[in-house]
Image (cartoon, rainbow, N blue to C red):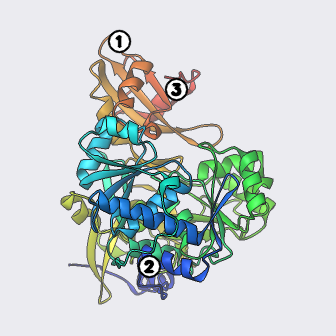
Amino acid sequence: MNKIALSDEALSIHRKINGTDAAFPAESLKELFEAAVDRRPEAVAVVHQGRTITYRELNGLANALSLRLGSAGVIAGNVVGLSVSRSPGLLVAMLAIIKTGATYLPFDRTWPDERLGGTFGMADCTVLLTDAPDTLTERFRHLRVVPVDLPALNADEKNPPLRVDPDSLAYIVFTSGSTGSPKGVPIRHRGIVRLVSDPTFVSLGPDAVIPQLASVFFDAAAFEIWGALLNGGTCVLYPSDHIRLSELKRLVEQNGATALFVTTALFNVIVDESPGSLDSVQTILTGGEAHSLGHIERARKHYGDGKVVSVYGPTECSVFATYYPVRGSVQGDTALPIGLPIQNTSLYIVSNGALCAAGELGEVCLGGPGLSPGYLGRDELTREKYVEYDIDGEKTVLYHTGDRGFALRDGNIVFQGRLDDQVKVNGFRIELGEITHFMNEVPYVKQSYVTTAEKESGEKVVVAFVVPADADCTPRACRDHLATKVPRYMLPGEIHVLDGFPLTGSGKVNRKKLLALRDQEQAPRP
């Protein structure tokens, strides 16, 4: 165990930061959802394209599908791949997996076969639950594929008697990894329950109406879905794959949405083009990457103080870890704080084995029941990132986020960038090293350098620069190769072919000069 050095000043500010303990149910998603069904069986649980489904109907359908999973050999502790379009079938499928005591593994079936096959292997996943059974059966003949067919299910099926341990795994999310292999992050039931039970950052209860906008393999979807269903509220499924502001406005107003989460990039578009789309919402949660202070200030002036809440949290900490309600002008500030820890979450700023006092820069480390137990099959990385400490006589495990920050005098934390080359683009966590790894595998690429740049809108874009090995090296050829290796969200938005890279005096690639070359020309699209 590691003992953290601390001064009186450092201990004082961290005590101010970490008074977050609160009671929350010691039950699983299964038990809490079934309790919500018992309380409000005829209340609307799901809305999708004008169709409403009650808690009683949703529960019965999930029970029936869980029986089919059982017939396919799924038992408690198994991992079930989940690929269902945003529809009532998605929620039925998630609940069905949970009701067997299994863990759901959301995936995008457009990902390359090699990546998906590796993901299933790392997670020991042998059963897929999907609304596209023919496609997946053809691609993965060694796996058992179970179709989601709601009309064939009995909506009156009773709850399975199984009780699920709150410390068991609810779902697994795979994030980008620097070595070319994605990292599997398992999340416990307890972590999600702690997130949505009487939260400090938003009001959740039976009157909550939450639009479901995020892709299910993006962890914000866990907040949207379970935040509604465990509290007896309503989950409103966005009807399209891509967000259109006119459609979002209509969905919010027609359904009386009380709170929603939007990525930083989408938030900026809303503020620029149609802030009135969200006038009727009580709380706008936004995060995923660093905020533009200009957009935050314009939003505050439009919506008023306190309606916009910035949220921050790595996948390893069960979605959100901190929150910052914007209650005053941010003009003249250098960065928007990521705020204070949410309920049942602890945060420490650590540098060189010591707690930092207010104003001292260090690494943001997180603790509490929201922590993942570690990375699938990556024991060495888990030991590196999840470290047990003795802090003022108390034992605690902290997750080293790799994010830098410092505490203000009032305890709010200010984000100050990364310790490595991990970035967030459109809410997705990307290791630039993983893209570089696969780019360097292209036979006609001699050298590559991958970084990010900002668009005029303030959004980040992944930019790749390559030195060709032969004439076959074109932006299109590079992109086509990458498309067989990584998901679409990891594909560079720009690929530039150069004769060579400018270097710094120490012999490293000169990123500043590369980006200046990019800016001198209209960025070519691959």
Give whichever of discs 2 and 1 has the lower sequence position.
2
Q: Which residue is mark 1?
A: 472
**Quadrant housing residue 51:** bottom right
Front of the two marks 2 and 1: 2
Mark 3: which secondary structure? helix
User: Would you say residue 399 is visible in this rendering?
Assistant: yes
What crowding class fits label 2: few (fewer than 14 Cα within 10 Å), some (14-19), or many (20 or more)?
Answer: many
* Numbered mark located on residue 31 in the image: 2
* Numbered mark located on residue 518 in the image: 3
What crowding class fits label 3: few (fewer than 14 Cα within 10 Å), some (14-19), or many (20 or more)?
Answer: some
Q: Quadrant of the N terminus?
A: bottom left
Front of the two marks 3 and 1: 1
Give whichever of discs 3 and 1 has the lower sequence position.
1
As shown in the figure, which amino acid type bears the numbered disc 3? Answer: Arg
Tell me: 127 left or right of 413. Answer: left
Taking the spot 58% from the left edge, 76% from the top edge, the residue there is 231
* Numbered mark located on residue 29 in the image: none
As shown in the figure, which amino acid type bears the numbered disc 2? Answer: Glu
As shown in the figure, which amino acid type bears the numbered disc 1? Answer: Asp
Q: Is residue 429 above or below residue 491?
A: below
Q: Residue 338, how many percent across, how many down?
A: 55, 66
Q: Nearer the viewer, residue 339 or 246?
A: 246
Q: Residue 157, how many percent across, how many down?
A: 46, 70
Mark 2: which secondary structure? helix
The CA distance from mark 2 to mark 1 is 58 Å
Taking the spot 43% from the left edge, 37% from the top edge, the residue there is 110
Q: Residue 353, how many percent across, how many down?
A: 29, 72
